[in-house]
Amino acid sequence: MKRRHQKWGSLVLLGGVMGATLGVDYGLANSPHEMSGFGGAVSSEDEHASQAGMDMLNNGGNAVDAAIAVAAMQGVTRPYSGGIGGGGVMNLYLKETDEHIMINSLPVTPASFHDRTYFNEQTGSLYNQATRTSSGAAFSIPGTVKHWEHVIEEYGSFPMEDVLSPAIEVARSGFIADANYVSETNRHADRFQLFTSSRDLFLDNGSVPAAGDTITNRDLARTYELIAEHGANVFYDGEIADAMRHTINEPPTVSNPSLNVLAGDVTSADFSNYEIIEEEPIHSTYREYDVYGAPPASSGGVTIASMLNMLENENLSNMSKEDAYHYYLESSRYAFADRRAYLGDPELSDVPVNELLSDWYTQFRHSQLGERAAIGQVPPGNPRGALESSPNLAYDFDEENGQEWSKEAFYRLDYGPANSPFDAAFNVRNGKGEISLSERLPTRGSAYGRAAANVEPSYEQEVRLTVNADHTDSDQRLRLFLAGDVWQSGGSQPENGYGLELRLDRDEIRLFSIVDGTSHTLQTTSYALEDREHELAFVHTNNHLYAKAWASEEEEPRDWTLSSMLSGPMTINQPGRFMLSAINFSYDNTQQFSLDRVNVRSLNNDRAHTLRSEEEAEPAERQELPDEDADGFEIEEERSMNRPFI
């Protein structure tokens, strides 16, 4: 512990600052549900939790008592929002001393965790995301209980027993499941089915509870009682620690779990050595306001400060509501792009806090905010002064075996949808970039993975790459996109983009465009991707698409394999990036695409003229697909087809 304090009256913020606090500058009308009063206020996402906090205040407690009562209750009624298995930050203001304190109780990895923990020792490959997130090896030492005890003893008014009492009562007597609880349980049901403990706790004979059902958690009630009676010691050095250690090191998996579950390696010392930290918050300003937030390893303080720094350069009060929201959303997109790239644990990485919040970098990022939304997912900047993303990309997959693709080359890698996040892996092996696809699950339309290149949006682009596939007898496809914007939710295609698809079971390549989510087939031709390397070239220029494919050991053909003029509903009138996806429709076979020498470049007029003169392409006619092909051309990932392929 960095320091100790006397008990004071306090203001506490548990969690993050919401964007709605900027509403005063937006000129928004007062909410019809606005409330006012004196003496304190409690806000949470659950009525039981808010009531527990209000009861603390009404009975003479302070903000710390109320905050912990709320958190404990949400551990019962909103278990997906937090609980004693995790950690967090608390922002305290002590009025008497005018002091701001940040309590850091973020989880800490056990001593056994290292940079190869998530790699398969036999293959050298990174385990898929579902294995990484659903295994004992993913466990970190929770900080919540020690946090509760510390702030109650140092800053609270009531003993732990009184603060936890409301949550204990509801955990034992039960609460009514609402739509949110049912939705969240359904979202995690597949993971719950992996373990006998979570299956029995959250599911009713294997099924998700219905809204209106009464939910009890007597084990959590008993756990809270032990903590109230014995303090944090029982959690970190007593019977609760022993039970957690046994569960993590010997996961209680069901027979024949649907994925590989890794055992953890956590020790008694990992639990007993855990300490929370009191530290100085991140301090920034927004106009006449002082803003205090959590420093790294939390990302909230820096991200919010970065957003506000950009917004301070805009006169929001003189804007329309729509324009103000636009700049708020754009600033958050740029701040979150930097968050993904640079924020982490300062004990394990160099976190450039001062650079991210510096005046020059704020001005640089603010200069990128436009009157229109940025195309696609915003790439991170470089606060250390290097150049931003280039219009061109040359990537040879020169990382060590087993490492993921470079985030400098592909800033976004998606391994599948949220409810099946283990469809794909993007690893480097022997100088090649592998996309490994799992089999299609019975409840899914396909298995897929997708990647977006870190290049500046461009109207006209060319991509060249080398590709191979481990077998070619199943319905499995590789798709390349030029001028792509954002991925369709739960899908392997962007909302807008020009596509080149290799379909293995048909020995076919297809040229198509996607405009506002609707795909137009432009041209198809036969091409067998045999068990050897092939070269692909795909170009968009002067409202034409060109593509060619040839075996790597052969000379590049002069003529284009496919070519099409774009017109009318097939044309995209905005710049975009190079994107790619791989899809597996097979229930029985996995697939591995191997890529190399990925080169993307924005085309200049001379190059465009050369390409145009090589072959005068005729306007493409939209092709009506026969009924028997409909299933193969569905938007396949998460739902039945609602948008037509034409």
Image: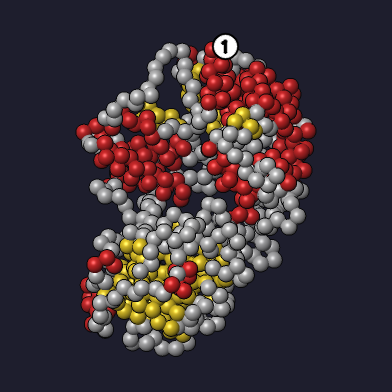
Residue 275 visible in the displayed image: no
Q: Residue at x 45, y 36 (%)?
A: 301
Residue that mark 1 sits on: 59
Q: Percent position (x, y) of residue 482?
A: 35, 67
- Sort mark 1 into few (<14), some (14-19) or many (20+) by Cα contacts within 10 Å: few
Position of residue 189 in the picture relative to residue 324 (left or right): right
Position of residue 192 in the picture relative to residue 556 (left or right): right
Q: Residue at x 24, y 47 (%)?
A: 371
Q: Percent position (x, y) of residue 211?
A: 57, 37
Q: Is residue 210 above or below residue 386?
A: above
Instruction: Name the one closer to the observer, 495 or 605.
Output: 495
Position of residue 320 in the picture relative to residue 196 (left or right): left
Q: Is residue 293 above or below residue 642?
A: above
Dividing the picture into quadrants, the one containing residue 408 is bottom left
Dividing the picture into quadrants, the one containing residue 69 is top right
Q: Percent position (x, y) of residue 379?
A: 39, 54
User: What's the coloring here?
Assistant: secondary structure
Q: Is residue 471 above or below residue 65?
A: below
Residue 555 visible in the displayed image: yes
Q: Residue at x 41, y 69 (%)?
A: 480
Q: Quadrant of the N terminus?
A: top right
Q: Is residue 262 above or below residue 521?
A: above
Q: Residue at x 33, y 45 (%)?
A: 330
Amino acid type, mark 1: Asn
In this view, the residue farthest toward the top is: 60
Instruction: Name the one closer to the observer, 513 or 277.
Output: 513
